[in-house]
Amino acid sequence: MAKLTFEAFRDELFAQAKAKGFTDYELYFSAGSGFSVRVFQGEIAEYKNTTTEGVGFRGTFEGKMGYSYTENLESDLIPRILDNAAANAGAIESAEDEQLYPGDDKYPEVVSYNPALNNTDDAQKIAWAMELEAYAKSLDPRVTMADFCTVTNSENHMAMANSYGLNLSQKSNMAAGYVLARVAENGQNKSSMEFWMGRDFADFDYKKLADKAVKDALSFLGASSLPSGKYPILLNPDTARNIFNVFDSVFIAERCQQGFSLLNKDKLGDVIAAPCVTLRDDGVTDLSLGSMAFDAEGVATKNKAIIENGVLKTLLYNTKTAAIDGVKSTGNASKEGYGGAIKTSTTNYYLVPGEKSYDELVAGLEKGIIITGVAGLHSGVNPVSGDFSVSADGYYVEGGKIVKPVEQITIAGNFYELLKNIQAVGSDLSFRSMGTGGTGMPSVLVSELSVAGE
C-alpha cells in the first residue's frame, strides 16, 4: 500500500471516523529528521542520520475520548486505528472529559525555520567536530581529553487538524555543538561542558566553544571544600535553569489539582516570591529556538506572567485542567510525541532579567558562593514539598572577588523559600532550548542557603 501525504491520510481518516460514529476527531502529525556526529581521539565515534514520522488520532466515541497512533500513513491501517481508539475510549476515568479545541481566531507569528541550515553538508559538520576536539586539546598541556565533541542538527514538522475545522502546521529546525573538556593537575581531575545552539551554522564558532570549556575546567583545579554554614548564594544561569526546571511542575495546574504542589488556584494573588521576581511563560519569543505558535491541542500560545513582582498570577493549563478550575487554557498542552496523551508543560519559561550584570552581582558579595553546577537534582529533590539537597561546586567569593574554586559541598533549602529570598536577578538572561520550548534564566542572588562542607 502506497504511503499517503498527511493531508490525504487526514481526509480519508476523517471520512471513516465519521462513518464509524465518532462525533468529533483530531489528527496530530509529527515528522522529524536529524544528523549527529561525535568524534573521539580523531576518529568518528558516533554517526547518526535519523528520520521519524507518525500520527496520533483521538476522537469522541460514545461520549468518551479514545486514542490511537501509527508510524505508517497507509490507508489500509485506518480501520485498525479507529477500532483501537473506539475500544479504549473511556478506559481512563477522570473528573473532566477531554474536549477537542475548535481553534483561535488569531495565532502569534513565529520564525522557527531557517532553510539555509540545510545548506551545510555532513562532511563540513564532521570536519568541525574534528577541529573542535583538536583545538580544545591544543589549548593547554593540562587538557587530558576533549570528550563528547559533537555537531548536530535537526528538523521537525508538526501539523494538526480536527473535525471543527482546525488546521495548523509549523516547521522548525536547529543546530547544536558541544564539548566536554577534561583537565588534570597534581592528581586532581576537573571537567566542564560547553554548548552552542542556533539556527545558522554561520554563528557556530568551535574555537569559542572550546576556549570557554577549557577555561572553565582549568578554573576548578585546586578546588576544595568550605566550612559548613549559611552563605549568600549566587546561582549562575545554568544552575538557576536546572533548579527552576526541576521545580516547574509546582506551577502545572494538573499537579496542583492532584495535590502534588503547595500551590493551587486559591493562592492566585498571593505573594509567593520576592518583589524582584517575575517568572513568565511565553510560547513565542525571539530568545528561544523552541517557540511554537500553538500548543498540542491547537490553542494559541500566550505570553503570561506566572509570577509578577512576587505575586502568583496564573497556573499553567491545558483545556481539560482549565475546565476543572473554571478558567481558559493558557496554551500549555503538550504531548510526548505523536503517540502520547495530552498533558501540560511549560513553553518558553524564563525569569525576567534585572539590571545588574553578573560582574556587579559578584562584586556585591562580601562573603558568598557562586554555584556553577549541581548534581543529584532528581534524587535530592522533593517537588511536592519544595525541599532540595544537592551536591554543588563553584567559587568562594570574599570582598566581591573570587578567592578559590569550591567542591565537595552540598546546598540545601526549599524552592518556595528560595523564591522569597531572591535578592537580585541578573541581566545575563540565557536560554537553553529544546525541541519545543525552552528555559531561560539569568544569574540569581539568594540571601542564604545552608551549605554542608568541611
Image: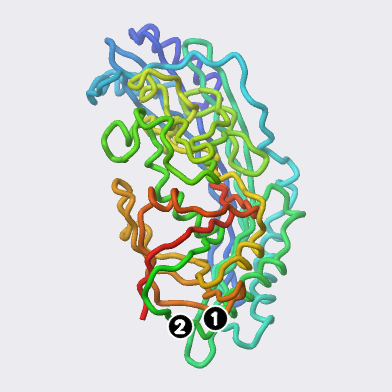
Task: State the quadrant of the C terminus.
Answer: bottom left
Give the residue at mark 2.
Answer: 224
**Direction bottom: furthest residue:** 186
Which percent across, then down, holds residue 288? Answer: 62, 43
Residue 449 tag number: none
| Mark before the other along the chain sequence, 2 or 1 | 2
Q: Residue at 56% x, 28% y: name it.
A: 302
Q: Is residue 305 above or below residue 419?
A: above
Any part of residue 415 in sight: yes
Helix or strand or loop: what does disc 2 sit on? loop
**Position of 382 relative to 63 (above/below):** below
Q: Which mark is residue 404?
A: 1
Residue at 43% x, 38% y: name it.
Answer: 271
**Residue 222, image x and y in percent?**
52, 86
User: From the viewer's perspective, is 234 left or right of 68?
Assistant: right
Q: Secondary structure at mark 1?
A: strand
Question: Would you say residue 434 is visible in this rendering?
Answer: no
268 and 367: which one is in front? Answer: 367
Instruction: Pick the residue in front: 39 or 407.
Output: 407
Name the spot of residue 32 as percent of width and height, x first: 55, 40
Quarter of the rendering containing residue 391: bottom left
The amino acid at mark 1 is Lys
The residue shown at (62%, 38%) is 172
**Labels 2 and 1 touching (C-beta < 8 A):** yes
Q: Amino acid at mark 2?
A: Ser
Q: How is the image coloured?
A: rainbow
Q: Is residue 99 left or right of residue 43?
A: left
- Disc 2 to disc 1, C-alpha distance: 8 Å
| Residue 299 coordinates in the image, percent (x, y) | 51, 22
